[in-house]
């Protein structure tokens, strides 16, 4: 799990542009990723921003009624 989180946090800044084409189907992303919690006191502002971007992406792609 730590390697997955580290990979996502490393790749995340590359995927935050206005025009983004994903090669990973939504269903695959939703199967692999879940919202991440953070500590706004202990984590750096950069880490908090990256986690919030990933969580926002998850909400848009994955938080749908089944």
Image (cartoon, rainbow, N blue to C red):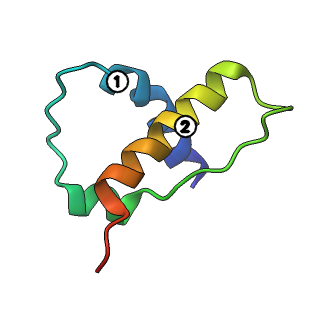
As rendered, which of 60 and 16 lies closer to the eye? 60
Residue 58 placed where, x, y %? 40, 51
Q: Quadrant of the C terminus?
A: bottom left
Q: Residue 63, relative to residue 54: is it above or below?
A: below
Q: Which residue is mark 1?
A: 16
Please tell me which of labels 2 and 1 falls first in the chain.
Answer: 1
Residue 54 relative to residue 51: left or right: left
Q: Nearer the viewer, residue 29 or 40?
A: 40
Q: Looking at the picture, how far across and down is residue 64, in whole percent?
A: 31, 68
63 versus 1 height, above or below? below
Q: Residue 60: where, in percent of width, then height? A: 33, 50
Taking 45 as reference, is 19 left or right? left
Distance of label 2 from label 1 (alpha carbons): 12 Å
Q: Residue at x 67, y 50 (%)?
A: 37
Total numbered badges shown on the rendered structure? 2
In this image, 10 relative to 20: left or right?
A: right
Quadrant of the drawing holding the N terminus: bottom right
Residue that appears at 49% across and 46% down: 55
The quarter of the displayed image where residue 61 is located: bottom left
Q: Residues within 10 Å of mark 2 (few under 14, many from 20)?
A: some
Left or right of 9: which side holds 41? right
Q: Which residue is mark 2?
A: 52
State the residue at coordinates (44%, 43%).
56
Q: Secondary structure at mark 1?
A: loop
Q: Residues within 10 Å of mark 1 (few under 14, many from 20)?
A: few
Q: Secondary structure at mark 2?
A: helix
Find residue 23 and report its image quarter.
top left
Q: Which residue occupies 17% across, 22% down?
A: 19
């Amino acid at each position: 799990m730590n390697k997955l989180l580290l990979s996502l946090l490393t790749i995340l800044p590359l995927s935050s542009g206005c025009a983004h084409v994903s090669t990973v189907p939504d269903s695959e992303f939703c199967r692999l990723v879940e919202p991440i919690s953070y500590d706004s006191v202990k984590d750096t502002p950069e880490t908090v921003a990256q986690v919030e971007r990933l969580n926002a992406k998850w909400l848009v792609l994955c938080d749908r009624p089944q």
